[in-house]
Amino acid sequence: MIESVVIFSSLTLILGLILGYAAIRFKIKGNPLVDQIDAILPQTQCGQCDFPGCRPYAEALAKGEAQINQCPPGGQEGVDALAELLDLEVLTLNEEHGETKPDHVVYVDEKLCIGCTLCIQACPVDAFVGASKVMTTVIQDECTGCDLCIPVCPVDCIYVREITPTLSTFVPNIPGEVRV
Amino acid sequence: MSNNTFSGGVVIANPYPVNQVEIVQAPLPSKVVLPLQQRIGAEAKPCVSVGDRVLTGQIIAKTEDQFCVPIHASISGTVTAIDKQIIPHKSGLKSNCISIESDGQDEWIETQGCGHDFLHCDRQTMIDYVQRSGIVGLGGAGFPSHTKLSKATDCHTLIINGTECEPGVMCDDALMQHHPREVVRGVEILLHITGAKKAIIAIEDDKQEAYQSLLMFSHNDRISLVQLPTKYTSGAEKLLIKALLNIEIPSGGFAADKGVLCQNVSSTKAIYDAVIDQRPLVSRIVTITGDALTPINAEVRLGTSFEQVIGLTKVNSQAHDYRMGGMMMGVDVETTQVPICKITNCIFVNNKKPVQATKECIRCNSCNTVCPIGLLPQQLYWHAKGKNIDKCMDYHLLDCIECACCSYVCPSHIDLVSYFSFAKALSKKQETDQHKTDIARERFEFREYRLERNKQERAKMMAEKKQALKEKMAKDKQADSAQKDKIAQAMARVKKTKEDNA
Amino acid sequence: MHSTGLNTNQIMRQVIYALVLGVSASYVFFGWGIIVQILLGVVSALIVESAFVAMRGRSVLASLSDGSAVLTAILLAISIPSIAPWWLVVVGVAFAIIFGKQLYGGLGNNPFNPAMLGYAFLLISYPLQMTTWPVDFLSLSQVVDEVFNLLNFDGISGATRLDDVKTSLSLGSDIATLQVRSISQSWINIGFLVGGIYLLARKIIFWHIPVAVLAGILTVASLISMLDAQQHLPVQNHLILGGTMLGAFFIATDPVSASTTPRGRLIYGFLIGMLIVVIRTYGGYPDGVAFAVLLMNMVVPLIDHYTQPKVFGRS
């Protein structure tokens, strides 16, 4: 009887010491969860989630202060990925924050541009090239399709161009799957 | 393996055998459509405009990149359009093409090559002729031949791939039977370019006529003919090298790294034409076969429509399925209004059949037994279906050559290869998307930093200005008070003087 | 383009045909029992499978036509005593199909062998009914009486020979004094062996698993005999008693729950053979095939991960 008490007490003590040591020695610096969430988010920086950028939304998610279904550019796949990462229930994309639009970039109709620079100030990734009273244009490769520039343009000269698949970017269907 | 074979693969009997392998010369087409996007490399830029008259063999488009294989007019006539047309690609997308209307004369441009005395030509000149003639791998891969030749600097063995392992395809067989002299000359040219010590022409043992035909013309003792057991995927470059030389090219590596150069036999003949005459690649031999018609081989001009080519033989009147390439690795095309390209080795025209029902995978492992690369297709299928690309990569998805041996034997009739090409395309898309989001994140963070920096600089500048103003005011004040003192003193002096005078 | 080999439905059907010889041998020695059990099992399998496939919203006809539910039912019906009450096979088959197959997503997705899952469930839940075997030939009317009326079994039932021997050995008898040979068991096993060889010849199963299972049995049984021959069953008897041949050729070879790589199959089969002998000798159950297979099913993902074949171009 006494032997079993001794054995289990010493086992508890030894295992507890090992766990304690491991908790201190292998402690992870910083908050990797925010980085992991940020890696899933599409970096459009559009603010449709009601946060000023993707990183603040990631931080809010890590603290549990936001829902996972607030990001339209990420689409339902983004919601699913966040649900898997954070071990939460999968929700459907919240329509209040906007709808998922197909992949697109914007372009400027240079004939109409008046050089007011409002679009340059609005773009979260600095995809515009221009200056005051100088014609402005979009660097298409850098545009994330966040659409923040469209409402601020006083002459409505910014238009949307959908990205269509090319021979090298084409992704075929799986047999039996219907492309939405 | 010592008996000239490799593990895996399937033995498939030729479904449409012919008694005599002949080549029919197709009549000149009335119109050709030449796609600007070749299989490898960037899209070529046209160097002619609509309305220009072009001669046969004239360069009409070029690319700027390192692969630069020019595109030539395959008939003489007028350029009628440079626009998007349907091309034979599994996506069914349209791509930019140059359309030429024939003037019926087939007037060629003047060209001059090394001539029959090619041994006096130097290596680089020959490679330049190969490039300028637009030669690519005609076995189906379409890799620019001049790039391959430039890379083959330490080559010790040359392999000429005459295996033609896809069942039903016989264009290489026809070439070897009817133009053996040009093929052997082409091999000698390649020996000269690469400096290799020996050349092996590999043929499957079901092509006895071709073997005999080549045997008659190969008097060079550096060239040997080897017969391989007839088995599908014996023509895959890395597997062929393993079967013949027992050298295994590492995954992701090139044959050139191990001193081996492999060229398809049709490419070899095209290289012969390019080096001797600088003849551009404007035609090729295409097999037209299937259960809906009498199989033939035809020499056709590039850009001819499938419809015209199929019309060269007798076709039945049922509904048909069309396929470019072989029955294993080919691509289904929806319409016959697509053009023959440099890599079109075969057109299959089959009667429409009902689609076989697919059942679930029962993990029987028949697929792994026949996979020539030794992959586990059932695992790749499982993870591709679940869109788990990371796990697919763990099972070496990128080593798959999409030969379709696994789909061929699957008892549940699962189209395994379509899952793998989906997974590869998805993996590429995910990589590109990841790259884009990383850059977007960087730009966003830099913008935040820039705005913050601007704010700081403004604040600093404001603070400095304030400070300067304060100092000025203090100085002014001092100057003021100094002035006041002076005035007071002066007034005091004046007062004193006044008082003194009074 | 597709090969003209057998498709999945045809494969399942061939396995069912290959069982005919062993079932016939069982009929010759023990009568109509096995036929009745098989019929009961097949009917319940079809009903349960249809119900669940319909609930899942899939095509019932496609699912039933592949014959996998019927095969599960037949294997389970062969494994249980042929005079078991009618509800035993019905409950067992229902459990096997629902918990061993449909809940995982149907054919191809189950990690455990459904027939053996059903058998294990029955053995643990109804040990008496599962260990009462017929000792003689029974006519159809006798069987129907037993199976549907639950009359007492004395006089026509008892333990299997394997069970008998094991009990006697554990009570201290010497192996030399026991009558270990059983003609009925030998013929039944030979029947299944011939069926198994037929499947091998038609390339419906690959040689790796059966050969490895038998090798495992022989190896471990020989080791045990070498250590203590008197107290244990001789090696050759392991092969002809119990469900050895059925297990080696029909149960362990279920492709969905077995290891899928060639080397993996050898390891899987060998360990099953080993476990069968160990459970028979040292365990509390008379025959170890079901538990050996189920235990190894659990280890299959690990085996598959570490026995991936060599890929061309990678060292």
Image: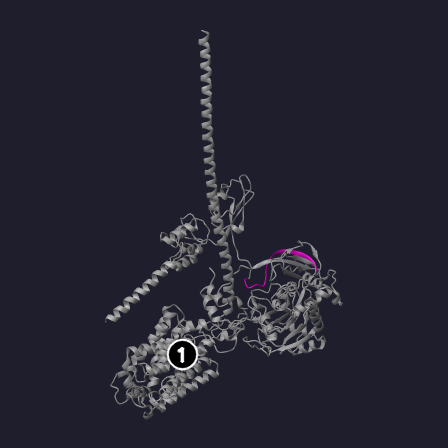
Q: Is residue B396 left or right of residue B153?
A: left
Query: Does the magenta stretch mainly form a helix, a strand or a loop?
Result: strand
Q: In front: B393, or B275?
A: B393
Quick check: can you spot residue C221?
A: yes
Q: Magenta span has B85?
A: yes
**What's the coloring here?**
one colour
Q: Magenta span has B80?
A: yes
Quick check: can you spot residue A103?
A: no
| Residue B437, image x, y percentages | 48, 54
- Bin the neighbour count of mark 1 within 10 Å (Cα to Cα): few under 14, some 14-19, many 20 and up: many
Displayed quadrant of residue B142: bottom right
Q: Chain of mark 1?
A: C
Three-letter code, disc 1: Leu
| Residue B247, image x, y percentages | 59, 72
Q: Is residue A63 left or right of residue B388?
A: left
- The extreme left residue here reads A1
Which quadrant of the rendered structure holds the N terminus of chain C?
bottom right
Q: Which residue is tagged 1?
A: C271
Q: Is residue B128 left or right of residue B391?
A: right
- Which segment did they paint magenta? B76-91
| Residue A64, image x, y percentages | 36, 53
- Residue B362, compared with residue B398, is above or below; it is below
Local SS, label 1:
helix
Q: Residue at x 37, y 78 (%)?
A: C292
- The extreme front residue here reads B500
Count of labels in the image:
1
- Residue C283, compared with residue B329, is above or below; it is below
| Residue C162, image x, y percentages | 33, 87
Q: In front: C265, or B131?
A: C265
- Residue A165, compared with residue C82, is above or below; it is above
